[in-house]
Image (spheres, helix red, strand yellow):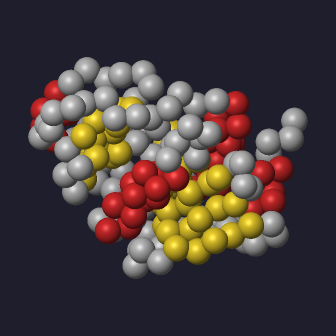
């Protein structure tokens, strides 16, 4: 849902107070993300937990839920943003920085029922244009995952297809296993 009628600059957008649900800045427009629902929330949490169990402990990468990433004159909030350990912005003290002004290495979006697939795919393609190594567009209704590669090639996966991950993360997960997490 677009919530601004006048065009803003990125700097003007970043000075606005945060909203709930969060809003993204895409092509000069403010677009509010939908409030996550059950399936979306469960997949998002389980993906962060699973990636971090393997990658964070080994200081390879870290998965962040709903992290604002500002780059390429846009400010997007992937459902899961994965950054390689050495690329995580830090303060001089070594503490993590609050602002991430770079694209994630791996961007994961989980489609909500009221979300436009083309809008979310556009965000993933924007990430790929600016250096993101891997994008996933997870569609719970169809039980499919679109993979977005750095050259903006898109791959369709379903069923027992193995999901690709960024190099260095030892994670073996099929599309069916991913959606199996939805069964409690």
Q: Please report the residue visible at 64 percent of the width from the left and 61 percent of the height from the top.
A: 145
Q: Residue furthest front?
A: 5
Q: Is residue 53 visible?
A: no
- Residue 174 vertical placement versus 9 (above, below): below
- Of residue 1 and residue 147, the one placed in the foreground of this image is 1
* Occupied quadrant, residue 156: bottom right
Please state if 8 lies on the left or on the right of 151 as rendered: left
Q: Residue furthest right?
A: 184
- Figure quadrant of the C terminus: top right
Q: Please report the residue visible at 81 percent of the width from the left and 60 percent of the height from the top.
A: 176
- Residue 1 vertical placement versus 164 (above, below): above
- Figure quadrant of the N terminus: top left
Residue 88 % position (x, y): 36, 51
* Image label count: 0
Residue 120 % position (x, y): 46, 51
Q: Please report the residue visible at 72 percent of the width from the left and 55 percent of the height from the top.
A: 142
């Amino acid at each position: 849902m677009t919530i601004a009628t006048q065009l803003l600059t990125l700097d003007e957008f970043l000075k606005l107070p945060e909203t709930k649900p969060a809003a993204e800045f895409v092509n000069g427009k403010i677009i509010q993300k939908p409030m996550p629902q059950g399936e979306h929330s469960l997949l998002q949490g389980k993906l962060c937990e699973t990636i971090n169990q393997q990658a964070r402990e080994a200081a390879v990468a870290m998965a962040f839920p709903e992290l604002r990433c500002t780059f390429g004159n846009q400010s997007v909030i992937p459902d899961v943003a994965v950054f390689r350990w050495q690329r995580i912005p830090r303060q001089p003290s070594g503490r993590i920085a609050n602002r991430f002004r770079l694209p994630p290495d791996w961007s994961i979006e989980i489609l909500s029922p009221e979300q436009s697939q083309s809008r979310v795919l556009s965000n993933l393609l924007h990430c790929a244009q600016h250096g993101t190594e891997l994008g996933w567009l997870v569609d719970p209704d169809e039980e499919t995952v679109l993979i977005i590669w750095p050259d903006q090639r898109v791959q369709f996966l379903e069923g027992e297809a193995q999901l690709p991950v960024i190099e260095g993360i030892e994670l073996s997960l099929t599309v069916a296993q991913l959606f199996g997490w939805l069964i409690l």
